[in-house]
Image (cartoon, grey):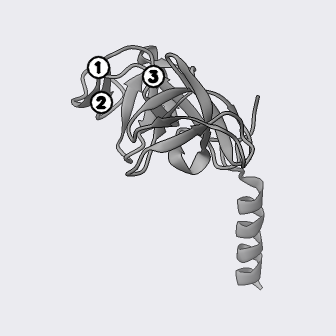
Amino acid sequence: MLRCASILLLVLVSLSVSAAPVRYVSTRSDKAYLREGPSFQHRILWVYKHKGYPFEVIAAYDVWRRVKAADGTVGWMSANMLSEQRSVLVTGKDRAGLWSDPEPRAKLVAYAMPGATAKLEACAIRSCRVSAPGLKGWIDKDRIWGVGKDEVFK
């Protein structure tokens, strides 16, 4: 009887805990330091030298954000180095098509190379509208990192 009550309690607790929504940010400037811990005294693990590089926020402590990069690298960044401006990173080994709209028979407008970043503007079910200097288009969600699989917004 005690075992059944313990299992029931675990089930109820697990049902009441909901996962925090995934949150993405990007680097505010051309230089951002990823640190081992949440202070300036912690060792620098990596220096990101690209404005607009996307990160997933996985925790927060005071003015520090624990972030994860597209390659899985995890560390801490000062919130001052991050922007709420959403961006995405093009993934894969080949260039990705950018289309005139999210419809299957849309016109191809450009290609994006793997590793390129772009400003995230909107997302439909299967694709997102992105922009870069002189360029706008829709790209398949499975070719970018920095947006949730089920995320849809205008």
Depth check: 136 or 121 in front? 136
Residue 123 is marked as: none
At 63% from the left and 44% from the top, the residue drawn is 148
Q: SS class of the residue under badge 1? A: loop
Between tags 1 and 3, which lies in front?
3
Q: Earlier in the sequence, mark 2 or mark 1?
A: 2
Q: Which amino acid does the dot numbered 1 rest on? A: Phe
Which part of the image, by quadrant, shows the C terminus? top right
Q: Earlier in the sequence, mark 3 or mark 2?
A: 2
Residue placed under numbered mark 1 in the picture: 40
Q: Which amino acid does the dot numbered 3 rest on? A: Gly
Q: Quadrant of residue 36?
A: top left
Residue 61 visible in rendering: no
Q: In this picture, is 67 found above or below 85?
A: below
Labels 2 & 1 near each other (Cβ < 8 A): yes
Q: Earlier in the sequence, mark 1 or mark 3?
A: 1
At 44% from the left and 14% from the top, the residue drawn is 80
Crowdedness of circle 3 by 10 Å Cα count: few (<14), some, many (20+)? many
Q: CA distance from mark 2 to mark 1?
A: 8 Å
Residue 52 is marked as: 3
Residue 35 is marked as: 2
Task: Residue 71: give x, y in percent of width and height.
Answer: 37, 46
